[in-house]
Amino acid sequence: MNSLFDLIDDKTKLSWLESDSIRPYVYVRNDNKIINPGSYFDVDWFHTDIVRKDPLKMDDVHFANLILDLEHKAFEKSDMPMPRWVFYDCAIIPGFVAGFAIRRDQLTQEMVSIYPRLQPDQEWIPISLFIIIPTMAENEWVAHNLCSINSMIDRKNKFYGLGFLTKAFALWYANIKVQLGMTQWTSPALRLHSHYGEFEILTAYTPVHDYAETLTYRLKVDPHYWDVFFKKNSSESFESRYLKSDISVVRTQSESLKLLQRLIEMGKGPFYLRPSELRAGQLQDSLSIYLPK
């Protein structure tokens, strides 16, 4: 696999990733620790010095408070902040949280305002988070939440690729082969999530969710797609493996989503989306649906 720095022209954009002031973190109880972390995928993008926190230790509750401060700020506009009990019962106990953390003395005043429960003696402050939980299927995990500080700070202060690298780090660290997730069709996050591997649509319309226009997806994690995200072009191998069908979907139209959902339920799939189309298209555009060759 290519070095991450070989994939971009301006190497200074990723200087933050090499800085000792920013490190990956894992917030996980001891019984959930990953065996041989980072051993399945041939990826050398990430710091080996990892900040580790244990949610079952009382003294580490301050780190959890900051994770929740960040998460609540990120999702307050969509009215989808995560309740604290959900964080503990449904995320921490079965799964774990991963992301990047910055040293306290590197926080700007703009960043400080995001964390109302920041303690003066806290050394590491989470600036991104990805919650992922194992399912009953072998080697399959479900993504619960992803966000970063980039959505809350001035453009000139953003950390290039922070959200994408947060999820990539967690998938790499936990040796995750198959990942499920849910996102809304109109969310910008859809473009990001499709760049981690083959992106299969499990539901196109999901009335059991609070937001019925939710997409449930499954992806086979493939770091080749990660390269493509940073090179900003389409996967060279996509057309050799997938065939464009005569089906399309308009993600802003509920009836279009329902029609695709009926086709899924009739067993006409499996159906896939192409990452380059998601990246280049506008919300009102129709998206092509692909079938495996």
Image: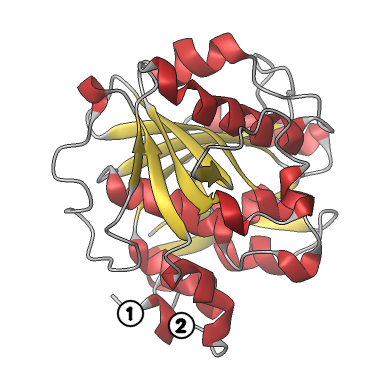
Residue at the front extreme, as displayed: 121
10 Å crowding of disc 1: few (<14), some (14-19), many (20+): some
* Between discs 1 and 2, the one toward the N terminus: 1
Under circle 1, the secondary element is loop
Q: Mark 2 points at which residue?
A: 7
Q: Horizontally, is 23 left or right of 264 in the view?
A: left
Query: At 52% across and 80% down in the image, what residue appears?
Result: 231
Q: What is the tally of numbered marks visible in this picture?
A: 2
Residue in the image at 59% along x and 48% along y: 127
- Residue nearest the observer in this picture, 151 or 182: 151
- The image quarter containing residue 18 is bottom left
Residue 128: x and y, percent?
56, 46
Q: To which quarter of the image does residue 210 belong?
A: top right
Residue 112 image label: none
Q: Nearer the viewer, residue 118 or 25?
A: 118
Q: Kindly indicate whether the residue at mark 2 contacts the one at mark 1 (C-beta within 8 angstroms).
A: yes
Q: What element carries label 2?
A: loop
Q: Name the residue under label 1.
A: 2
Residue at the spot 66% in from the left edge and 36% down from the top edge: 70
Above or below 230: residue 74: above
Q: How far apart are marks 1 and 2 (CA)?
A: 7 Å
Residue 184, above or below 157: above
Q: Which colour scheme appears in the figure?
A: secondary structure
Residue 245 visible in the snapshot? no
The amino acid sitting under disc 2 is Leu
